[in-house]
């Protein structure tokens, strides 16, 4: 009996390897996406069904469903903060069914294989290898290797990092429960995109940040509350540290996104020397009650500039950098002003400067 089980596990690992390799080489081929991928997992699930007809367990089902619904509601409500955009998918019944088949079958197949392989051995190295292979099966390698540095950086932040965090979470959930939990979370994460006529419009940084926060919160909920009866001698300080880490990280991300009254910006030049210098971080307040001599943050020709107000007319503002000999040639309209300078932090903006220079250099080389 054990020999048969071992053989089955080898077959599952072989299926996972075949799927991952085919995904890496054929991901951008329409035949693979539209037909082969769905057929591959349909056959697998039919075979699996005869071995285990109880696909979804009832244990933890209600808790997972409630958590998933809450995050789905929060996802949709984020559109009222960041705005909405029209979905790119066709919403005829046939198209919805076709798109859902393409997304649902792989979710079931991958999570069943993950659960079976992870729980069939006690080797942490092999478990890590299985998790890495599943991660690779979700990455678009064409976008990874054939994109500009700017697009690559955005893809890593918005897609790859959340994939890594998600798979670590799903491995943890699979080792402590059943494959139904990752399946339900994935369904609520992926399916709304194909069902909703409008979806929240989030840029790459918001998308990646919110995904990481979501998976971190789910991890804490399961570890300290839902799985609590299975965890022996849980230390209170561990719960506090995890909670504080998530809260602090979330607040920092929301601060960087400009959701609060105050927002940071990195200074790229020395035009305001000695008030502040290149590499400093300026914190400004979203306030348009401006007086002469105030330092304002404004947008001009797709650039963010931080200069001092010299004079105010009825319809525009005249500005000047403290280190400059002449006033700015542009006349700043009120709607272009983002806020008023409050204070600065020295040298903290250099990472942003290095990234900015790296991408500018790439654009010059491309020309």
Image: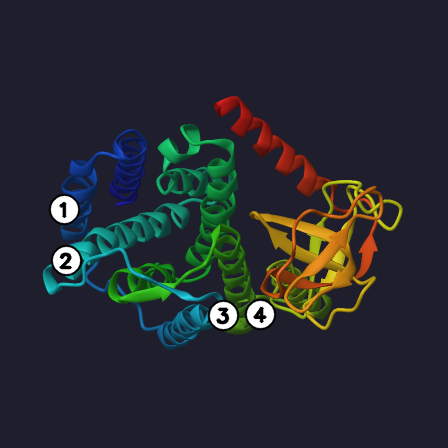
Q: Nearer the viewer, residue 329 or 65?
A: 329
Q: What residue occupies the far front of the structure in this picture?
A: 314
CA separation in Å, label 3 and label 1: 43 Å
Mark closer to the chain start, 2 or 4: 2
Residue 88 visible in the current orientation: yes
Vertical side of 326 occupied by 207: above or below: below
Pointer 4 local density, CA inside 10 Å: few below 14, some 14–19, many at least 20? some
- Image location of residue 228, percent across then percent down: 55, 71
Labels 1 and 2 touching (C-beta < 8 A): no
Labels 4 and 3 touching (C-beta < 8 A): no
Q: Which residue corresponds to mark 2?
A: 95
* Mark 2 or 3, closer to the camera: 3
* Mark 4 or 3, closer to the camera: 3
Residue under the point 24% across and 42% down: 4
Vertical side of 39 occupied by 237: above or below: below
Residue under the point 38% across and 74% down: 69
CA separation in Å, label 1 and label 2: 22 Å
Mark closer to the chain start, 1 or 4: 1
- Numbered tag placed on residue 43 in the rendering: 1
Viewed as shown, does residue 137 lie left or right of 322?
left
Pointer 1 local density, CA inside 10 Å: few below 14, some 14–19, many at least 20? few
Q: What residue occupies the far left of the structure in this picture?
A: 94
Q: Which residue corresponds to mark 4?
A: 224
- Image location of residue 47, percent across then percent down: 15, 49
């Amino acid at each position: 009996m054990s020999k048969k089980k071992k053989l089955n596990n080898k077959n599952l690992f072989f299926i996972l390897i075949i799927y991952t390799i085919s995904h890496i080489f054929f991901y951008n081929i329409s035949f693979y996406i539209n037909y082969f991928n769905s057929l591959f997992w349909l056959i697998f699930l039919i075979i699996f069904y005869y071995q285990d007809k109880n696909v979804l367990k009832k244990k933890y089902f209600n808790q997972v469903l409630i958590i998933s619904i809450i995050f789905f509601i929060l996802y949709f409500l984020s559109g009222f903060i960041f705005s909405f955009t029209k979905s790119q998918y066709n919403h005829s019944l046939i198209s919805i069914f076709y798109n859902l088949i393409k997304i649902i079958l792989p979710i079931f197949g991958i999570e069943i294989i993950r659960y079976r392989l992870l729980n069939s051995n006690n080797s942490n190295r092999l478990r890590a290898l299985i998790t890495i292979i599943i991660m690779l099966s979700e990455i678009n390698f064409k976008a990874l290797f054939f994109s500009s540095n700017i697009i690559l950086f955005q893809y890593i932040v918005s897609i790859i990092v959340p994939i890594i965090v998600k798979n670590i979470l799903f491995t943890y959930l699979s080792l402590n429960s059943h494959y139904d939990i990752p399946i339900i979370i994935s369904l609520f994460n992926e399916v709304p995109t194909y069902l909703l006529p409008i979806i929240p419009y989030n840029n790459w940084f918001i998308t990646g940040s919110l995904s990481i926060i979501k998976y971190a919160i789910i991890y804490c909920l399961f570890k300290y509350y839902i799985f609590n009866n299975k965890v022996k001698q849980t230390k209170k300080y561990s719960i506090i540290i995890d909670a504080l880490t998530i809260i602090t990280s979330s607040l920092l991300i929301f601060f960087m996104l400009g959701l609060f009254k105050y927002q940071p910006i990195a200074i790229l030049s020395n035009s305001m020397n000695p008030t502040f210098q290149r590499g400093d971080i300026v914190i400004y307040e979203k306030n348009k009650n401006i007086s002469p001599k105030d330092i304002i943050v404004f947008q001009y020709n797709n650039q963010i500039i931080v200069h001092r107000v010299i004079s105010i007319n009825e319809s525009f503002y005249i500005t000047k950098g403290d280190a400059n000999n002449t006033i700015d040639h542009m006349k700043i309209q009120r709607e272009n002003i983002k806020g008023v300078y409050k204070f600065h932090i020295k040298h903290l903006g250099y990472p942003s400067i290095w990234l900015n220079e790296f991408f500018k250099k790439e654009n010059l080389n491309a020309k």
